[in-house]
Structure formats: structure tokens, C-alpha cells
């Protein structure tokens, strides 16, 4: 699994002109699931997400997590994170997991984030044509790949 975490002032997801979720200060997370991913990958990434110290403390040092600041988390599925661009100019999504694996692992990631934070996470709608709007704070953007955890 691969995630892109952005520290945001606010974020929202709109589908067919209707806002389906929004958050204030916190983390906007794009979640990509590949064919070989496992529930352990989802759990590991969720733990990294909520513990990542990318919010400033009193001295202006990035030393606080989303847990520490009481921030919100939004998770949006994004299969394009699995793209391979090694050959040619057209991305290949051959490594992307099908719905039968991607949906349960995305849902597990979100459930684990909720368990660890003790609060509901905002989310997009899996497979929908979503419009994601956010204000990146910093900007701070972190990419984490579960294949690189060891």
C-alpha cells in the first residue's frame, strides 16, 4: 500500500456537486492499494499516519502528531498511486488491486485510523469521480510505502 499524507488547514470531497465529507485542521490521506498488499500493511500505515510528527510545537518544530493536536483525518482511495511510469508516457495500473482486495484494505486502514484516534475519519466514496479540495499547510506532504517498512 502507498499513501500520500498532506498536512492541511482544511479539506473536502465533493461527488456529483454534493459535499460528502470535510475536515478542518489535520491530515488529508490518499490511499492506494496494490495486488500484493495485506491487512498488516493497512494496520502499519494507519499507525504511521496517526503517529507521524508533522505538526509544529510551541517552538515551531514539527514535533506533534495528529493525535497530539486533536486534528482530523480524511482518507480518500486513489488507485493512481499504484501507477508505474517506467516505460513510455502512459501510466500502467497493472499493480493496482481489484475492488475485491482494495475496498477491504482501504476500509481496514480507515477503521484502524478511527480506532487509534478514537474519532471518526472523513472519507471519500470508493470508485467515485471525486473532487478533492484542500489547503496544504506548509506545504507538508509525505509519501509512505508499506513495501519499504523494513
Image (cartoon, rainbow, N blue to C red):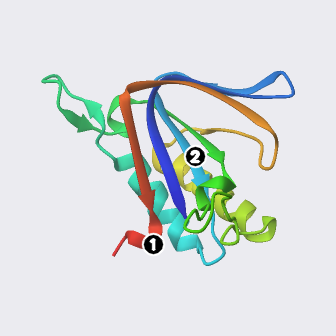
Q: In the rendered picture of this protein, how many numbered marks are placed on residues?
A: 2
Give the quarter of the figure containing the C terminus. Answer: bottom left
Q: Which residue, given by chain and number where applicable, does mark 2 sit on?
A: 30
* Residue lying at 28% horizontally and 42% vertically, measured from the top left: 53
Judged left or right of residue 88, residue 50 is left
Image coordinates of residue 7 in percent, x first then y, are 42, 33
User: Label 2, label 1: how many angstroms apart (C-alpha)?
Assistant: 16 Å
Give the quarter of the figure containing the N terminus. Answer: bottom right
On residue 123, which mark appears? none
**Which image quadrant for residue 138?**
top left
On residue 147, which mark appears? 1
**Which image quadrant for residue 79?**
bottom right
Q: Secondary structure at mark 1?
A: helix
Residue, far right: 16
Whichever of labels 2 and 1 marks the residue nearer the N terminus, that label is: 2
**39 shown above or below 22:** below
Q: Secondary structure at mark 2?
A: strand
* Residue lying at 45% horizontally and 63% vertically, measured from the top left: 145
Judged left or right of residue 44, residue 120 is right
The crowd level at tag 2 (other Cα within 10 Å; few <14, some 14-19, many 20+) is many
Amino acid at each position: 500500500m502507498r499513501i500520500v499524507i498532506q498536512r492541511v488547514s482544511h479539506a473536502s470531497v465533493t461527488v456529483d456537486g454534493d459535499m460528502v465529507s470535510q475536515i478542518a485542521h489535520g491530515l488529508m490521506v490518499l490511499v492506494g492499494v496494490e495486488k500484493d498488499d495485506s491487512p498488516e500493511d493497512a494496520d502499519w500505515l494507519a499507525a504511521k499516519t496517526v503517529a507521524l510528527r508533522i505538526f509544529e510545537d510551541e517552538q515551531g518544530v514539527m514535533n506533534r502528531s495528529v493525535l497530539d493536536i486533536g486534528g482530523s483525518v480524511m482518507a480518500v482511495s486513489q488507485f493512481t498511486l499504484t501507477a508505474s511510469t517506467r516505460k513510455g508516457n502512459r501510466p500502467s495500473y497493472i499493480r493496482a488491486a481489484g475492488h475485491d482486495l482494495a475496498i477491504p484494505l482501504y476500509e481496514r486502514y480507515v477503521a484502524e485510523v478511527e480506532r487509534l484516534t478514537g474519532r471518526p475519519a472523513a472519507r471519500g466514496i470508493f470508485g467515485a469521480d471525486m473532487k478533492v479540495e484542500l489547503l496544504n499547510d506548509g506545504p507538508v506532504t509525505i509519501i509512505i510505502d508499506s513495501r519499504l517498512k523494513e
